[in-house]
C-alpha cells in the first residue's frame, strides 16, 4: 500500500489569478498512529542496517514491497529519511567533508574527551568485564577537601588514550575487582562515525501486524 495514496485529494491552484485548479493529494495532513504500537516491544524484531541498505530495500526484504517503506519509518520514528537513518560510508564521509572541510582535518581535530572505565571482576575464576563511558565536557574540577580548582588538560588526538588510574579491590569473599580509568580523545571524525552507528540498530514491525496497521492508516485518513 502506498502511503500518500491514502491521503485525500483537494483542489489547488498554482496561479489563483487564472483560477486554474488541479486535483492534488493533501500531503499536509498529519497522521499519528497509536503510540501503544510503538511502545510494545513484543510486536517488533531487531534489525541491523547494512551499509548498502536503504529504507526501501529493507521494506522489500522484509515486507516484500518497497511501498511499505513508511512502515520502517513509522516503527523507528524516522522523520528525515536521510539524517535519521544511518548513512552509507560514502555519504557519511561526504557529510563529514561538508561539515569539517576535509577528512584529514576531521580526523586530527579534537571533538571531546571520554573517560572510559573498565571494570574486571574475577569471582573464583569467572571473569566479567564491563565498560562505562562518560563525556568530559569541563576542563575544570573542584576539590572540596582542599578548596582548590584544577585544570584538566585533555589528551591530544595524536597522543591517543591517556592512563588515569588503576585500582584493585579484594572483597571479603575473595572476589577481585580491577578498575582501569582512561581518558580517550574523540576526533570530529570518530564522533560522526559513532553517532551514525547509533542509528544502525532499528526495529521492524512484525509482518502479522502489517494489514492491521494499513487498515488503521486508511481509517484515520478517511475521517
Image (spheres, grey):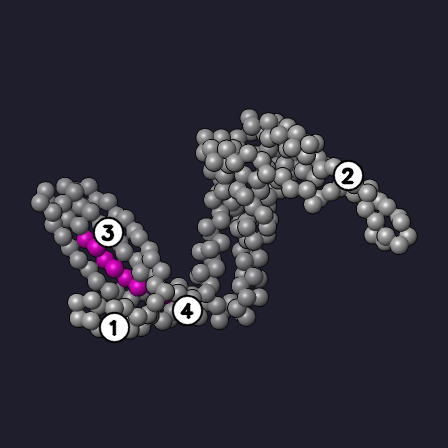
Residue hosting label 3: 119
Q: Where residue 167 sits: x, y (%)?
A: 17, 58
Q: Which mark is residue 9?
A: 2
Residue 196 visible in the current orientation: yes
Q: Quadrant of the C terminus?
A: top right
Residue 45 visible in the current orientation: no
Q: Is tag 2's residue or tag 4's residue first in the polypeptide sequence?
A: 2
Q: Is tag 1's residue or tag 2's residue first in the polypeptide sequence?
A: 2
Looking at the rendered structure, the secondary structure element under dot 2 is strand
Residue 30 vertical position relative to residue 110 in the rendered view, above or below? above
Looking at the rendered structure, the secondary structure element under dot 1 is strand
Q: Is tag 1's residue or tag 3's residue first in the polypeptide sequence?
A: 3
For the record, the magenta segment spans 178-185
- At horizontal 86% and vertical 46% (from top left) the residue drawn is 21
Residue hosting label 1: 149
Looking at the rendered structure, the secondary structure element under dot 4 is strand
Residue 137 vertical position relative to residue 23 in the rendered view, above or below? below
Q: Is tag 4's residue or tag 3's residue first in the polypeptide sequence?
A: 4
Residue 179 falls within the magenta-colored stretch: yes
- At horizontal 74% and vertical 37% (from top left) the residue drawn is 8
Looking at the rendered structure, the secondary structure element under dot 3 is strand
- At horizontal 61% and vertical 27% (from top left) the residue drawn is 211
Q: Is tag 1's residue or tag 4's residue first in the polypeptide sequence?
A: 4
For marks 4 and 3, give the CA distance.
26 Å
For marks 2 and 3, give the CA distance.
60 Å
Q: Which mark is residue 110?
A: 4
For marks 1 and 4, give the CA distance.
24 Å
Mark 3 surroundings within 10 Å by alpha-carbon count, few (fewer than 14), some (14 through 19), many (20 or more): some
- At horizontal 14% and vertical 41% (from top left) the residue drawn is 124
Amino acid at each position: 500500500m502506498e502511503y500518500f495514496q491514502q491521503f485525500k485529494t483537494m483542489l489547488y491552484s498554482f496561479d489563483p489569478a487564472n483560477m486554474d485548479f488541479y486535483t492534488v493529494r493533501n500531503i499536509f495532513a498529519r497522521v499519528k498512529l497509536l503510540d501503544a504500537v510503538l511502545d510494545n516491544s513484543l510486536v517488533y524484531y531487531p534489525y541491523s542496517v547494512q551499509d548498502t541498505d536503504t529504507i526501501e530495500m529493507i521494506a522489500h526484504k522484509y515486507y516484500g514491497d518497497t511501498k511499505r517503506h513508511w512502515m520502517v519509518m513509522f516503527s523507528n520514528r524516522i522523520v528525515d529519511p536521510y539524517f535519521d537513518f544511518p548513512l552509507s560510508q560514502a555519504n557519511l564521509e561526504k557529510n563529514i567533508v561538508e561539515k569539517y572541510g576535509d577528512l584529514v582535518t576531521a580526523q586530527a581535530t579534537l571533538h571531546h574527551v571520554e573517560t572510559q572505565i573498565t571494570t574486571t571482576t574475577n569471582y573464583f575464576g569467572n571473569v566479567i568485564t564491563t565498560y562505562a563511558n562518560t563525556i568530559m565536557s569541563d576542563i575544570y574540577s573542584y576539590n572540596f577537601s582542599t578548596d582548590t580548582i584544577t585544570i584538566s588538560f585533555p589528551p591530544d588526538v595524536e597522543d591517543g588514550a591517556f592512563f588515569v588510574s588503576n585500582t584493585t579491590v579484594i572483597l571479603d569473599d575473595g572476589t577481585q575487582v580491577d578498575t582501569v580509568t582512561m581518558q580517550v580523545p574523540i576526533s570530529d571524525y570518530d564522533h560522526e562515525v559513532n553517532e551514525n552507528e547509533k542509528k544502525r540498530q532499528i526495529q521492524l514491525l512484525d509482518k502479522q501486524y502489517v494489514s492491521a496497521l494499513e487498515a488503521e492508516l486508511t481509517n484515520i485518513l478517511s475521517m
